[in-house]
Structure formats: C-alpha cells, structure tokens
Amino acid sequence: MARGTYLLASVAACGVLAFVSPAHAQQAAQEMTAQQAQDIIVTGSRVARSGFDAPTPTLVMTAETIAERGATNIGDFLNEVPSFRPSVTNQTNTQSSNLSGATFADLRALGNIRTLVLVDNRRHVPTSPTGQVDLNLIPTVLIERVDVVTGGASAVYGSDAISGVVNVIVNKTFEGFRGDLSLGLSEEGDNFERRVGLAWGTSFADGRGHFVIGGEYVKSDGIDSFEERAWSRRYDESVSFAANRPAGTPSRMFASGVRFINSLFGGVILGNNADENPANGADVLRGIYFPDPGVVGSFTYGENSGGSSYNMSSSVGTPPRAGHTLVLPIDRHVVMGHMDYELSDSIGFFAEGSYGRSGSDYSGPMPRDTAVSGARAVIIQRDNAFLPAEVASIMDANNIRSFVLGRSNPDFSSTRIVNFNSTYRLAAGLKGDLGNSWGWDAYVQYGENKLDSQIRNMRIQQNFMWAFDAIRLPNGQIVCRNETARAQGCVPLNLFGLGAMSPESVDYVNGTQFQSITTTQTVAAVNLQGQPFSTWAGPVAFAIGGEYRRDSAQSIVDSLAEAGAYNFSNPAPYSGAFVTKEGYVEVLVPLARDMPFLRSLDVNGAVRYTDYETSGGVTTWKLGATWEPLDGLRFRTTRSRDIRAPNSAELFSVTSTQSTLRNPFNGVSRSYTVAFAPSATLAPEKANTFTIGAVVSPPFLPGLSASVDYYNIDIGGAIASFPAQQILDNCYAEIQAGSPGSFCNNVELSGSGAATEIDSVTVQLLNLASLKTRGVDFELSYRFNMGPGRVTTRLFGTYVAELTSDDGLGVAPSYNAAGIIQTRGSVIDRAGQLGGFTSGLNTGATSVPHWQLNASLNYETSKWGTSLTARWIDGGIVDATLVQPGDPDYNPASPISVADMNVNSRLYLYWSGNVTLMERDGKRVQLYAVINNLLDKDPPFPNTQLAGFYDRIGRAYKVGVRFGF
C-alpha cells in the first residue's frame, strides 16, 4: 500500500471530519470584539481611535483561519488569496540559485519587491539582497493575525509599500502551553512533510510582565524530479524552428513529447561536419551518438526535428527538464521570544528576539553543450585521444578534421544547489501613556541575515575546454593538448559515452561555487499619537513620527567565481550601505456623524518625507475618506503617492549566467551569456495609487456581507531588470528601424541579417520603465445558524483588467516591408498571460490570470466541522509577446508566430476538517485533517511553461493534532 493511501486510511479510521476555509482570509476587522478594537491600531494607518475603519482596503486573517487551513507557513496561506501571486515558493523557484526554499509575498503581481512585510508594525531585516522577507522565518504558532493592506501605504510605512503591506501581528498575551503537530504526504508517496510547532506564555511580577516564546520545525522532502509525475513526463515544451522553415509553419509551437536532439546523454555529433568530400552528398557524421563508453549509435530523428533543437517522437532524445527538481525540499526551524514589562503605570518596556534558519538542498539543472560555433562549442579534433575508431575511419575517408559534439551531462557537472538563510533579529523599546488619549512609543532594532549559497559540481569552463581536447603522445600517454594546461595539472576528459570520464577528470573540471551575502538592518523609530481636540463629529486623531534606518550588504565569493571561471552565475564580491531618514504626519478628521445620509464621514491624510543617502529626498502622501450614508453601507476611497527605493542587490550586485534565448534575427533558440549589471544612480520608483469601494452589511439580513473595491496602480520610473529576451527583441526592432539605440548598446552582436549572432546580453537597471495594473477585488459571504452549528458560505476573488509593462522608450510593434509583424513592441499587457513565470523581481509583470475566484461552504459545531473549498484560476495564453492564429497580426512567417498557446482554466477543490476530542478547564485537544487538490488535477498544457498558480504535487493528505493547556 502506498504511503499516501495508508495515511488516508488512518484519517478515515480516526473519523476525522473537515473544517477549513481559506476564504476566511477576508474576515473583516469589525468582527473582533469591542475590547480588541480599542486595543488595536488599524494596519494601514498609525492613528489610534476606537472604531476607526481605514479607507484603504484591509484583509484580516486570524490565527484560527490560518491554522484550520493546515498551512505550515503564512506564505502558503497568502498564496491562495486571489490578490496575491505565488511568485516565489518551493514550487516556482526550482531553478533559482539564491532564492531556493524561500516564500515571498507578491501583491497585485507587481513583484514581491513591492510588497512590504512588517512584524507588529515594524520592519523585518531583509532575508534576501533584493529586499524581501522570507515568510518561512516567522513562526506560525505565534501569529495572532495577519493584516494585509491591498493598496499603497508608503506615506504610513515608507518604502516598498507600493502594492501593499503584509503586517504579521504576534500574539503577545496568551498564557499556557500549546502545540501543533502534523504529518503530510502526497498520494504518490513523496513530498513527506513533518511539522512541530510549540509555544508557551506566562505572566510574571504579579502581572506586570508577560513573556511568550514559540518555535517551529518543518521539514519537507519535496519531489526530486519531473520524472515523478505522469503529467511532467509528457515533456511539454516550446519548439522553435529555423528562419528557413516551410511556408505556413509558424516560428514555434508548444508540443508534448519534446526532447532535445542537440545534446544527448553521452554526446551526439551536430551540424555541418566540415566535410571536404562533396561527392558523398551528405553530412556523414550528423546524428552519430555515443550512448555508452565504447558504443557508437545512429540517432533516429523524429517528427519536426528538421532545423530545430528538439524532437517530438524519438525516445532517445534528452528530456528538457532532466535533472530539474519538481518541488523543492524545505528544512526550516525558527524561534521567537517576546517580553512586555510595565515599568510604571504609564510606561511599558518590551524586548523581542528571533532566530530562524530556512533553506533547501536540491538538484539543479545540468549544463548542456549545444553550440555549433563560437568559443563555447565542444569541437572535437580528429586526433582526439578518446575518439572511437569507427568515427575516426569515417572522418579519414571524408577528409573531416573536426566536428561539434552536443551533450547533456548528468554524469558530470550535474549541479547540486544548497542555500540556507540564517536570520536573527533583536528589538527593544518603550511605550507610554501621556493621558488624555495621548501615547507614544519608541524602539530600536537590529537584524542580520546571512545567505550561504553553494552550487556544487559547477563546471570550471576553461578547465573543461582544456580537458576534453586530449591527445595521445608517442609513448601512448593521453594528455591535454594545451601545454600550459598540462603544466597546471590538466586531467584529460573523455566525453564519448555516458560515464566514460574518470573520477579524476571530473574533479578537475568541477568546482563548488560559493557565495555568502550578509545583510544587516538597523532601525530606530519614535511615534506619537493622540487626539488633540474634538469637533462636533468626534475627536480628531493625530500621529507623528520619525525613523532612521541603515541597510548594509556584503557579498563574499570564492576566487573562481570572482574570476568568472564557472560556466554560469559567477557572482561578484561587493559591499555597500545606505542610510534612510524619514518623518511623517498623519491625521484623521471626522466631518459628520449621525446625520441623514451622513451616518459618518471621515477624512484621513498622511504625508512622509524620506531622505535616501543614495538618491536624495522624496515626498509621499495619502488622502482617503470613508462615508457611511446608512447603517450597513460604507464607501471608502484613497489616493496616494508611493515609492520603492533601490535595494542592495540593485545598487551593488553583479552576476552573469547562461540563458536560453530566442535569436530574433533567425528565430533559433539556444544558450547565450547574460550579464546583470548594477547602477549606483538609481532613484526611487514612484507610484500613483487610487482605490474606491463599498462595504455592505444590511441590518435587515444579519450574517450577509459584501464588498467590492476597484484599484489602479501606476508606477513610473520603475527599476527595470528587463528580460534579456525583451532586450534582444527591442534591439532587433531598433535595427529594423535603422537606428540602433539604447537596447542594442546592451547587446554584443556579430554578423548580419539572418546570420547575426548574439555574443552576450547585458541587463542594465534603469529608471525608465513603468508598470500599471488595475482591477477589482470582491467578496460575498453569508453566515447563519443551522441545527447545532453554523453555516458559512463565501465567494471572493480578483479580476485583473490590466497588467502592463512599458520600457519607457515607446517602441511600437514593428513590421517588415511585407507587413509581417516582427515584435510586439515595448508596451506589453500581460493580464491573462500564464506562462513566462519568473520570481517577480524588478519589472515583475510576467503573468497573472484575469480572474481568480475562491468559494467555500463551511459547517462548524462546537465539536467538529467540515468544509469544501474551491479555487478557480482563469485560462489565458502562454506569452503575450507572441501572435497565434486568430490574432489580427498573425502570420506564420513572423518570427514571433506560434501555432497555439491557449491555456485552459483550472478548478482545485480542498476538503479538510477537525474534531475536538477534549475541551474543558482551559484544556483542548483537537485532531484535524486536510486533503489538498481533492480531484488530483494536473497543471494544464503546456505544463513546464507554467508555474506558480498550478499545483505540482497532486492530491495530498495531512493529519495533525492541536493542543493547549
């Protein structure tokens, strides 16, 4: 019996029923008790006034809601909320060499660097040099609630709050001991997960002090490879065709059964063979391959392989995702402690500390040698010492002096990526009551994050080029041809056949790339709140404060990476720091109360001035209003100016890598060198945000509530790490227009026309881009009693009307002399795009469906509960930069044409629940279970081109126990 089936049987044996509703993410703040409302400052505002509802839409997710879903970290829970995009999770960043194992929050699909994460209204030290906070490093067991501001909040909280704020509120008052233990397993018997979460709280000093501490350990085994699922063994890929393809054939297509034919395991002879015997009328070596040491085979090319790098029928070709991890393993432990102590009746002190370590150890992609020309081509000379005699005879008979070998390399240089973040944070502060509704608080905080990243079995490129070019000396000894390399200890490498090389040669060719990035943040802040006077409509609330912040980053790398010796990545050492000083004022003014059609009317405004050491000063502001014309009907609106300052990576980091790109001059895709360059002249991004909405809770129908909010975010001067493909496409458009410009300045080219070759692409950060998104969030829920329990029905979702990236240069779609489209231009609306999914850095506008919906039906009693939840993801297209049949611009002769790129919608169901075994005298024991992806839905076609929104695991089970004493 499979482990997954055994686990399901255990659940049934226990009689565990289900109760969970991720739609509880929309639970409103007004559902809290009156006492709670008096003690809370609403996230999205720093003014404190009982009953104040912020004009900025805010979601409130309680600890109970998160626990019921069975999520092991709050990031997994947030990624089910339609307004979030799961841009960095253990299912989306499986090829990243520095973000593995992390979970970031990404509101509005504007990039996770534009979502600010706070803990108790305070910043958290970044756990990435790009400025984000890994939500794995916040212990779920201590969370009281999570507030999400779904609109700009820079005037209130400062930089990075362009798309919104995730504010994690820690439970600092509970007493006793509690825990949450669980086990999870997929139906396929993998992705085994175990979690232990424990917390303890107590009062001391006759109630003047309170201390809480909590920690978690979570270990998930992940899913090792794409071979572990039937859907991923379909090998859905994009197939590119050459510029001289048959008439009526588009430049590419998405197909199943795709395999590489230009880089076989063990090696295959590629391209033209420099054949000097034209009489034979053929490239006599093409297709000879070497499956095993000493074995020479003849490769059978399959359907649609002519002029392409791919096969779509042969079982011999290399699976494109060979060696890639399907779902990353996660290993994390985190602990946090908090103490409050009343120094006097009017002054309190707090101290807080946390430590966490989270990361992943997994298989990375293997290098593939595919070049048919250039410095990186594997050129085998006739006198190569390891050349099989059969091939040597053919070369001699046809006067062939050399050939190019294509090879995938699982037997050497198959990378292993090991990334772990270690974070600690210390904070201490005071808060005081000045009387007459006035209060103050001040704190200092220091945090340090260390990212230790290793990529093992990294190819040392020059060593590799020396090693495979081996010759035999007259005495029979096999040595490297290059005498300098020979003197430096070069070990000859045999590439003919899988596993043909010696261990010594593998050790000579490979190394371990190492990078350690230490990021620190020091913060000092002071805030004052009060109600200076009242109008006839109520008290005016006021807040003022200031903050000092110093961020620093230092990168240490190994000497080979510093010299650029590896075949990709090659991070450089760097160090830098910058200081930020800012001050703000916020005010809430009631204008009307208890009047006809003016049940209440409040205006809320804030302004903040921020001085960045690197780029100077900038002012942000917010103006909002709430109007309640009738009981149960409230309108809200905000208008704000928001910012995001450059982070440490954007200011200091340098890397280079190899990326598969499409050459727009001939339509052929292969690997190219891409360099990422920093810029010390970057200025903050600036965004204009507008929201307007309504909340309805009719008194005549208790339990019914609805809300709808429109949002419009327009970011100017976006710090744009343009995709390398976009740089190439725009350079091509510039050349077609006869005026090579800024994009071509970042591309090294050789040749001309269809023979133009790309030597390298540099991704340069600029403040020229813009991003714009607009859409609607909505919710409808109804709660009523039935029998011994309570029924809750809920529907909520997000509609994204636009998600447009503009490089700022205004490059229009380009057409050739025959009127055939060549590029879509530089302004791309990616709403409805579901492929091309990236980590959401910089421009980040890579994919988001038009619609996402969550619906749930829940029944809960005091002893048990059950729920069925549905999550629907709208269909769309793979890539908005391409044209397909039905598009007005479609022409198969176009270099951006594609046969079909439609993506079907997906509906996921979740069934889960709990049963309370004991609850008396403050003691409680509860069993719970979760079944994810109840219908076992696979990702849609073309599955390997899509990520993020779609479940890769399949049906999975979790059982656990919660207890409190």
Image (cartoon, rainbow, N blue to C red):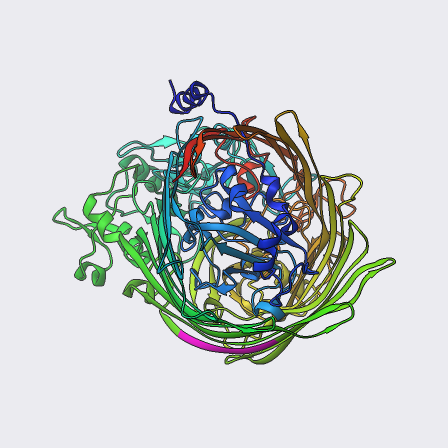
In the visual, does 146 lie left or right of 83?
A: left
| Residue sitting at x 57%, y 54% | 36
Q: Kindly report the secondary structure that dominates the magenta region of the rendered protein.
A: strand
Q: Which residue is outermost to the right?
A: 596
| Residue sitting at x 43%, y 26% | 188
Identify whether 487 is placed above or below 607: above
Q: Locate the C terminus by quadrant.
A: top left
Q: Is residue 85 among the parts visible in the rendering?
A: no
**Where's residue 131, x and y in %?**
48, 63
In the picture, residue 657 is in which quadrant?
Answer: bottom left
Identify whether 883 is placed above or below 256: below
**Where's residue 582, x and y in %?**
55, 78
Q: Is residue 17 among the parts visible in the rendering?
A: yes
In the visual, does 418 lie left or right of 301?
A: left
Q: Which of 52 and 83 is in front in this view?
A: 52
Q: Nearer the viewer, residue 796 or 287?
A: 796
| Residue sitting at x 49%, y 33% | 232
Membership of 103 in magenta stretch: no
**Where's residue 341, x and y in %?**
40, 64
User: What span is in magenta?
Assistant: 576-584
In the picture, residue 55 is in which quadrant?
Answer: bottom right
